[in-house]
Amino acid sequence: MPFRKFTSLVILTSILLTGCSVVDNWVYRPDINQGNYVTPEAIDLLKVGQTKDQVVFIMGAPMLTSIFGDNVWYYVFRQQPQHESISQRTYSIYFDQMGRVTDIKVSALENSKSLEEMNKQEISDPIDIQSDDETNQ
């Protein structure tokens, strides 16, 4: 009889642990940030009429460029915090033949956080970096 109870308990426990989504939240998952880190301040600095050099200075190198020429640059900021849903914002910057910005378009995945919320996301495993000046004081 004790063997039957033990076997039943083992089978029940294994069923609960293998298919239960609650267990998934116990597993550590690192935050995954991909693409260009885009800040609201950088977006505020972008203006129609700027040159490609000015855009690179503000936003950095684009993640993607158009396959039909160098007249569309894509900046993709994708974030997947531990057990939360994915947020993604894509900034498409269009240039004319002279290399000046003609249009800036923004797209986001459905149910994505705003850019401000994405930038407020705390890193799950922050690294404490100090400059040489701070450590010498």
Image (cartoon, rainbow, N blue to C red):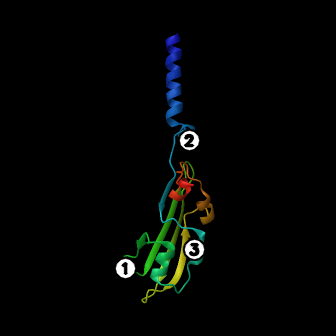
Answer with the quarter of the image where residue 21 lies. Answer: top right
Residue at 54 percent across and 64 percent down: it is 109
Tag count: 3
Question: Where is mark 1, residue-wise?
Answer: 68
Residue at 53 percent across and 21 percent down: it is 9
- 49 in relation to 7, above or below: below
Question: Where is mark 2, residue-wise?
Answer: 25
Between label 3 and label 2, give the one nearer the viewer: 3
On residue 43, the disc is: 3
Pointer 1 local density, CA inside 10 Å: few below 14, some 14–19, many at least 20:
few
Q: Amino acid at mark 2?
A: Asn
- 12 in relation to 77, above or below: above
Q: CA distance from mark 1 to mark 2?
A: 44 Å
- 24 in relation to 59, above or below: above
Residue at 49 percent across and 12 percent down: it is 3
Q: Position of residue 91 (x, y in %)?
A: 52, 72
Q: CA distance from mark 3 to mark 2?
A: 35 Å
